[in-house]
Image (spheres, grey):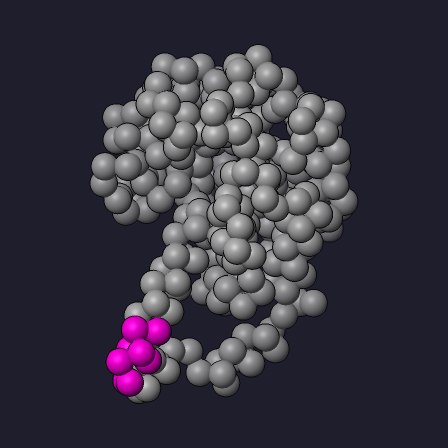
Amino acid sequence: MPGSELYEKFMTLHTREGGLVMPNAWDGLSALVLADAGFEAIGTSSAALAASLGRFDGRHGITREEHLEHARLLGRVTGLPINGDFEDGYGVTSEDVATTVEAAVASGLAGIGIEDTSGRPDQPIRDFDEAVGRVRGAVTAAKGRIVVTGRTDNFLQGRPDLEDTVRRLTAFAEAGADALYAPLLPDLDALVTVVTAVAPTPVNVLISPSDHVLTVPELQKAGVKRISLGPALYTHAAEALEQAARALVAGDLASATTGMSFDRVNALLSRTTD
């Protein structure tokens, strides 16, 4: 599907009544499980991808090409629109970000997120003008072929400044971002403030505000247009693995070996579009 058609298809999911729930996969099988459940689009998770490779998230531990290949895999096996959680765009300059966007379009991605993070623990959030310039560079490169999400990680990085968060998201929208995202907003009031301030640009939420996990209908009522889960499904699976490992250490083979049958695995694999 050409980039412009994929862009329109993915944007339609954002702008329709209720928007979409976009869970994040971490390998081919998890993507197939989500596709089989009926989800219409899938996101990558930079945190889950990094952890699966034994690396830390947000410190440039994953390369652009590694993430692109991962995203291409999810798209190949499912045939669904894939949104790339591409950290800060994998580059020092706005031109580097544009190169990443071009590569994402060439790889068949439907969407790409650009954060205002720096990968530097001493100064994790980029200056305002630099952050806006990078989103503008991404939008210019996108040319209506891929959905660009402008994201600020203020709250995720320990900077609980709602005013600055709204300022950044508003500027990202003015720079042409198709969707906006501020993970870990503290409560529903803050979420509604963001949604109202940037309307009509669609807003993504990571599961819920920090203080309380809401239902999908409650988030939709608040005006959220996209719900993502980040690494939550990956860590859910990891918790099940840890429990199985503890059972195995205790000698309980039965508890350690429950789960999806390999017949089911093969049935899912047989449905790949690859």
Q: Position of residue 222 (x, y in %)?
A: 31, 33
Q: Is residue 200 above or below residue 31?
A: above
Q: Position of residue 14 (x, y in %)?
A: 50, 39
**Residue plotted at (37% across, 23% down):** 159
Between 182 and 17, the one lying in front of the other is 182
Between 68 and 197, the one lying in front of the other is 68
From the image, give the main secondary structure of the stretch colored magenta: helix
Q: Is residue 4 visible?
A: no
Q: Is residue 183 left or right of residue 140?
A: left
Residue furthest to the left: 212
Q: Is residue 26 left or right of residue 188?
A: right
**Residue plotted at (74% across, 25% down):** 95
Q: How many marks?
A: 0
Region in magenta = 245-252
Give the quarter of the image for residue 135.
top right
Instruction: State yes or no: residue 248 in magenta.
Output: yes
Q: Is residue 122 above or below residue 206?
A: above
**Quadrant of the drawing holding the C terminus:** bottom right
